[in-house]
Amino acid sequence: MSNERLELMVTKAFKIAEDFSHQYVTLEHVLCVILEDQDVIDVIVELGGDPLEISDHTYAYCHTELEEIKIVAEQRPIKTMGLERVFNRAFTQALFNGRQQLTTVDVLLSILSEKNSFATYICASQFVTRETLLELIADKNEEDERLNNDPRNKKESVLRKYCVNLNKEAEQNKLDPLIGRKEEVDLLTQTMARRKKNNAVLVGDAGVGKTAIAEGLAYRIVNADVPETIQGHTVYSLDIGALLAGTKYRGDFEERMKEILDILEQRDDAILFIDEIHMIMGAGSAGQGAMDVANLLKPALQKGKLHCIGSTTYEEYREKFEKDRALARRFYKIDVPEPTPGEAREIVSQSIATYETYHSMQISPEAIQAAVDLSVQYLHDKKLPDKVFDVIDSAFARQRVTETGLRKNIIDEDLIKYEISKLARIPLDTVVNVKKRETQMINIEEKLRDRVFGQDEAIDLLADAVYISKAGLKGRDKPIGSYLFTGPTGVGKTETAKAISELLNMHLVRFDMSEYQERHTVAKLIGAPPGYVGHGDGKMGSGQLINELEKTPNCVLLLDEVEKAHPDVLNVMLQVMDNGMVTSSDGKAVSARNAIIILTSNLGAADSEKNIIGFGGGKHNTAQDKAVKNFFSPEFRNRLDATVQFKKLDRGHINKVTEKFLNELKYMVKDRGVKLEWTQAVTDWLSDRGFSETMGARPMAREINENIKKPLARKMLFDDSELNNILVDINDDAVQIEYR
């Protein structure tokens, strides 16, 4: 009995004494507690007694015969001297028998040693005495020793301790049946039929079902659905953790492993399965020259007397397992590819009954098909069929934690789509092809024109791309849209990207390309390559672009002032715009298929301002096009959905920009409880001073800062007078602010 269990038993005895208002905790209180233990019940039955009879008489005795130890005042009961002797005697007896922990039978034997007690009397009336109990314990110890000395039992005990019998797991319906994978099972069976090197290693991506093949093989063996070669075999799964636990001294681990291998070699019907077999490389090694599991396995594998199946991923196979050539040559490599969507649907359909039984719910065939199709489309970091089971299991679990009145008993297609949107971190309307547009999608062009002025062409292109994507008509392997915005500074290129992200409730991921002017800055986006400083650094992760897309796949990806970036940096975007995927330096692929990619550039803006020399004059209208063609490679331009030229702002647009800036200031001071108003003269005055064909709307912001925000800030910070209303007007060609 562990210390925790002993404390619990004593606590229950005290609780019984408190319920009867007894001053002391006696042997009878403890007897009531241990009579609830199954070991004590079994012992009493073997001796011919009735545990229920003893329990009833003991409770009755505590209720009626212990009146003299009752107390009126509230106080905690205390143990009697007899109870102290019982526990001390029980501990001594356990230590004498070579045990570090106390059992309930020890406590019962110690209670029976107390002669003058009701507990001893009532037990004796049911043929339970100290002498009969000692005789029974002696007989059990003799039987245990005989069984332990039996070589067959000893072997089974070792295998049971360090291995998991998958055949028994299958018999108890704890394993799922193996669906499909006929080719892999046939190769596995063929390998085991060999005279030597009859071992196989299953290699495949995580989640494709490598472990399921080994477990399914045990299931088929139990159901006699295997070739004659392996009929009647038993699959044992090696537990390396249990094998290593408690190996305090040099040689303990080697002794355990050698014992297992010797037992399995002597059996013709045993198959050893080692999941994540790359873990045996170095397992148990205690320093240079020490033996590990791999080195212990080699002689047994070479003889052909041991059937072994391992499983690992391609990466671990290359990095660890394959480097030990002597070990790798003893295994036949079986590739386990990702199943096709059709195969995955068959696997899920035939295995889903276990999930339905567990969750006490059902799932429709349409929902299973949707789970397969949508997981292939949106969940790119996992493999079939594992990601399909994840989606379905998560949908079942969500319904189980839903309120009873809102809970559904059948998982339908809509619930699967909702779960996909949560797991992929994308809006639900991206997954669901809704006929009715969401509120935020209605008249998106007009909403953009309220924020960005004079750029109707760019707005129309963006709106059309968004509509196509939301309707489910875009290519599955493409981003929502890839656009290059060109034009002079201050005309609204960056503002358009910000506006579309806010209107569509998409996260804005902005990269200032002035930070990526050098060739080596590619590592900042996708991570440092192997052999370079920073590779595998947890602080840097896989690169800024990889991390952002992984965190928020549904986003507006803005590469601002892209002409300042090194050409090698732009080459990274080729894969993103063409295939909707980007791969980090360590091989991790992240999807960008739910992102809007916007690149801004000022290329050709300066040349377009130059006048044409010769007759006719005018401006270089084609300067921007030429600059874009000269800077970007043909393969880069070919991957863009559109190159949008932003026009210069004219005088009419500047008035709208002025009103927009003033309205933003109005909402700022409104949060401070101040009302801001201005006259039309202020708008005209700011438009005249803030208008610039070359600088766009940016001078306007400086004029407002200089003439309105600065004096207003001083007034609000350093003037103690109450400020409620502000009127801005023009007087003598200067801004006049009136505080009310």
Image (cartoon, rainbow, N blue to C red):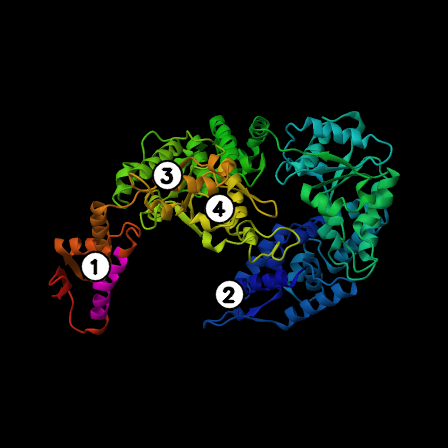
Circles 3, 1 touching at the beta carbon (< 8 Å)? no
Residue 695 on image: x %, y %: 31, 52
Amino acid under disc 4: Leu
Q: Helix or strand or loop: what does disc 1 sit on?
A: helix
Amino acid under disc 3: Thr
Gap between marks 3 and 4 measured at Cα: 36 Å
Gap between marks 1 and 2 measured at Cα: 67 Å
Check disc 1 and report the residue beneath it. Answer: 670
Gap between marks 4 and 2 measured at Cα: 63 Å
Check disc 3 and report the residue beneath it. Answer: 622
Residue 600 on image: x %, y %: 40, 46
Q: Helix or strand or loop: what does disc 2 sit on?
A: helix
Quarter of the image with the N terminus is: bottom right
The numbered dot on residue 549 is 4
Q: Helix or strand or loop: what does disc 4 sit on?
A: helix
In this picture, residue 475 sits left or right of residue 222: left
Circles 1, 2 touching at the beta carbon (< 8 Å)? no
